[in-house]
Amino acid sequence: MFFGKSWDAWIAQYETSHRNRVNLICHQFGIPMIVVSLAMFAAAPWVAGLWLWAAALFTAGWVLQIVGHIFEGKRPEFFTDWRFLFVGLRWWLAKVSGRV
C-alpha cells in the first residue's frame, strides 16, 4: 500500500501513459540513471568531482524521460500527482522483473 492505494493500482495507472515503444525504452534507461545519480549525489561530499558526474547523469536521465513523453504524446503522471515520482521506480522494477 502506498497512500491508501495498492502498488498494483498505482502501477496500472502509471502504465496507461507508458505504452509507446520509444517512451518505454527511454524510461528503461532514464529511471535507473536518475536513481544512480541520487546515490552519487549522496556520496559526492566525500568524493571529489563526483557531483559533476551525478549532475550529468541526473540531467541525461530526465532528458530521456522528457523525450519519451514527447513520443508518447502524454504528460508525465507526476504533473498531476507528485506521488508518481515514486511509482516510476516501482514500475521500472516490475518491468525488469517481468511483472508488468
Image: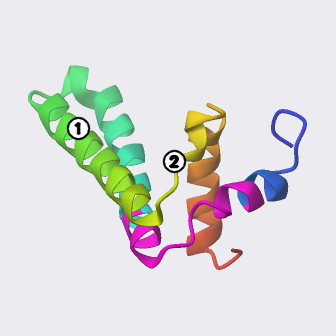
View extreme (left): residue? 49
Question: Within the image, what quadrant is residue 62 found in?
Answer: top left
Q: Position of residue 52 (x, y in %)?
A: 13, 33
Question: Within the image, what quadrant is residue 13 found in?
Answer: bottom right
Q: Position of residue 50 (x, y in %)?
A: 16, 34
Q: Secondary structure at mark 1?
A: helix
View extreme (front): residue? 73
Direction from residue 66 to residue 54 in the image, left or right:
left
Q: Position of residue 57 (x, y in %)?
A: 23, 46
Q: Name the residue nearer the viewer: 21 or 8.
A: 21
View extreme (top): residue? 45
| Quarter the C terminus occupies | bottom right
Which region is colored magenta? 12-26
Q: Secondary structure at mark 2?
A: loop
Q: Residue at x 82, y 59 (%)?
A: 8
Amino acid carrying label 2: it is Arg
Q: Earlier in the sequence, mark 1 or mark 2?
A: 1
Direction from residue 49 to residue 91 in the image, left or right:
right
Q: Residue 75 shows which numbered tag? A: 2
For label 2, count other residues whose C-alpha is less than 10 Å away and answer few (under 14), some (14-19) or many (20+): few
Q: Name the residue nearer the viewer: 2 or 82.
A: 82
Q: Is residue 38 above or below residue 17?
A: above
Its colouring scheme is rainbow
Q: In front: mark 1 or mark 2?
A: 2
Q: Residue 54 shows which numbered tag? A: 1
Q: Residue at x 81, y 39 (%)?
A: 2
Q: Name the residue nearer the viewer: 79 or 99.
A: 79
Direction from residue 85 to residue 44 in the image, left or right:
left
Q: Are marks 1 and 2 in contact (CB under 8 Å)?
A: no
Say how many tags the image has: 2
Measure the alpha-carbon separation of dots 1 and 2. 25 Å
